[in-house]
Amino acid sequence: MTSVLAIDLGAASGRVGLVRIDRGRLALTELGRFANIPVSVGGTLYWDVLRLYRSVLDGLRAAGATAGQVDSIGVDSWAVDYGLLDADGALLGNPIHYRDRGSDGVLSRVLAEGHGPELYAVTGIQFLPFNTLYQLLARTGSAQLAAASTLLLIPDLMTYWLTGTVRAELTNASTTQLLDVRTGRWASDLTRRFGIPPALLAPLCRPGDRAGHLLGEVAATTGLARETPVTAVGSHDTASAVVGIPAAAEPFAYISCGTWSLVGVELDRPVLTAASRVAGFTNEAGVDGTVRYLRNVMGLWLLQESLRVWSAGGIRVDLGELLRLAGRLRPLSAIIDPDDQALLPPGDMPARIAESCLNTGQPPPDSPAATVRCILDNLALAHHRAVTDACRLSGRDVGVLHLVGGGSRNELLCQLTADACGLPVEAGPAEATLLGNALVQARALGAVGDDLPAMRSLLRRQLPPRRYEPGGDRAAWQRAASIQSQLADG
């Protein structure tokens, strides 16, 4: 039996899972789940990264107490955010949260200076205001950046603290807009032109590479063996989630649905056309040389933030009951653009959604359940738009849409997505990221098949997805999709 620990750090929560693989069967046990709560200090929003690391150690300690031998550990997380180390390897302050407003205006300036076509041709990355490149440009001239010797993305920082090894895993590095998507190497000429020293960027590694072994202090703290290896996985959580899709042979599109929805198709080469750039698609590195050709959709952030606001305001809400009530309401009563940048920062999300409706002459939702229905209808429409564009721009025809991650538990969202897209949706597993993380480790240990189809076939046998057939009023969904596209296009 092979036992591996998968550490998955999301923008809202983290978890540590133990995956055991024995004779072609796998079992997942969650050893720890913890909140990932940002902290605002002096007008800047930070990740509480030391608390996050302590929670990781707590999960590893639980493994040390209950799991016996652990054969490998792997870490994945969200993208773009980073910590800076000084020449002694010490962290120079908490990483800044991608929802912080400190990078506002940088992307617009870069595009106004005419860098857009070249940036896309080299990196293949969509233009999002929080990309690592723009975060760094926003801090040009700061004392912290001047003192920095090394930049590590969040999973690389965690791996460094566990092993002492300084490396940058490829799938997360590809999200920074600092990597050459054509060569799989740092785009040194480009970074120099933006005033970013290439030496700041750590040496690259790939999923399956050995990152190192646990440091003595980590082993002593957790009770795990000092020789326990840490393996590089698809350290961008979406890269691991895509490995964890229980796909059959049929060509598929996917949605990794959580705080964000990452919607796209898996390709063997990037799409770097002007049309792809204008449509806002990104070409991120996947496992085994694949390309995650996708677009970010705002995702369940809208629902999560609405629930937080209601709770903080003393409104008692039960998500299950809200979803039940929302499912009874008339569909498509109001159309908004869920990717409107006004919805990106934390704040009063229900009020912002109501304002968006009023600004377009539509009646706003009149209850929490109506707000939830508005969010899910429009998220399903955004899924449809992204899937349609991904297929059109890549030339890939698909017959099924896989929806994995926490959103796969939301039956109403799964059905609405099938209705909006006109495609069957196969939902689950919810823990695709943990499972994809674990499978890459297990393959490095020789415990599972050699390629992605073999790993996915194992998952499909063990965790068959739930299938939702498209229904509803197809013409109404198409009309709504057209209205949302017009809103998104300004």
Image (spheres, grey):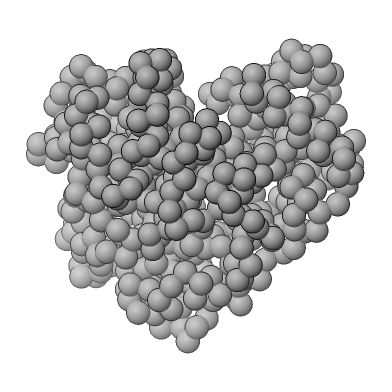
Front position in the image: 401 or 312: 401
Q: Does the rendering let one see residue 49? A: no
Camera-side residue of 40 and 452: 452
160 or 330: nearer the eye?
Answer: 330
Q: Name the residue rendered at 47%, 39% in the picture.
A: 273
Residue at image point 47% right, 69% down: 452
**Image quarter of the C terminus:** top right
| Residue 387 in the image: above or below residue 93 | below
Residue 42 picture location, percent across and down: 36, 15
Question: Is residue 26 left or right of 392 when viewed as pictured?
Answer: left
Residue 96: x, y in percent? 35, 29
* In the depicted structure, whether residue 336 falls above or below residue 53: above
Q: Residue furthest left?
A: 88
Split into 4 quadrants, where in the image is the N terminus? bottom left
144 lies left or right of 170 = left
Front residue of this view, candidates 100 and 339: 339
Does 289 sit above or below residue 1? Answer: above
Q: Position of residue 427 (x, y in %)?
A: 67, 59
Q: Quadrant of residue 50?
A: top left
- Residue occupying the far bottom of the picture: 23
Residue at 87%, 37% in the rendered image:
476
Residue 267 lies left or right of residue 415; in this view the side is left
The answer to whether any part of residue 270 appears in the image is: yes
For the point 38% across and 73% down, the residue is: 443
Q: Is residue 186 above or below residue 265?
A: above
Q: How many marks on residues?
A: 0
Where does residue 15 sit, x and y in percent of width and height? 46, 54
